[in-house]
Image: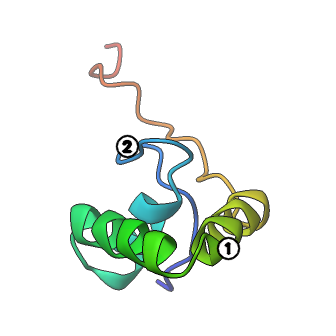
Amino acid sequence: MSKKLTRSSDDKWLAGVCGGLAEYTGIDANLVRLVVAVTTVLGAGSVAIAYLVAWAIMPKPAPSTWSGYPPAA
């Protein structure tokens, strides 16, 4: 099964972009957020623009079919 780069529905603060990147790469989401925050400050906001573009381009994850309840007997 191939991995798809999507926004995270579980591990998100704003739009799920950093959580989605973390799930795709296997890196901790907080580390991805820290790198994005630091590079945004040091790069005069250019990463913030890339974040907004990724928010617009990255698809939402497919809805889960599992409802959390056991199937009716």
Give the percent coordinates (x, y) of residue 65: 50, 37
Q: Residue furthest top?
A: 73
The crowd level at tag 1 (other Cα within 10 Å; few <14, some 14-19, many 20+) is few
Task: Residue 50: give its label.
Answer: 1
Query: Mark 1 belongs to which amino acid?
Result: Ala
Task: Residue 31: give its label.
Answer: none
Q: Earlier in the sequence, mark 2 or mark 1?
A: 2
Which element type, helix, strand or loop, lies under badge 1?
Answer: helix
Q: Nearer the viewer, residue 44 or 37?
A: 44
Q: Nearer the viewer, residue 65 or 14?
A: 14
Residue at (27, 22) in percent of width and height:
70
Between marks 2 and 1 in the image, the one whose residue lies nearer the viewer = 1
Residue at (33, 72) in percent of width and height:
32
Q: Is residue 43 left or right of residue 22?
A: right
The crowd level at tag 2 (other Cα within 10 Å; few <14, some 14-19, many 20+) is few
Q: Report the number of discs.
A: 2
Question: Which residue in the structure is indicated by mark 2?
Answer: 10
Query: Mark 2 belongs to which amino acid?
Result: Asp
Q: Is residue 47 left or right of residue 25?
A: right
Q: CA distance from mark 2 to mark 1?
A: 22 Å
Q: Is residue 68 above or below residue 4?
A: above
Give the percent coordinates (x, y) of residue 73: 31, 13
Give the percent coordinates (x, y) of residue 45: 61, 69
For the residues bearing labels 2 and 1, Cβ distance under 8 angstroms = no
- Residue 22: quadrant of the picture: bottom left
Residue at (70, 60) in percent of width and height:
52
Q: Is residue 48 above or below residue 1?
A: above
Q: Is residue 54 left or right of residue 39?
A: right
- Residue 42: quadrant of the picture: bottom left
- Residue 35: quadrant of the picture: bottom left
Q: Is residue 11 above or below residue 35?
A: above
Residue at (31, 25) in percent of width and height:
68
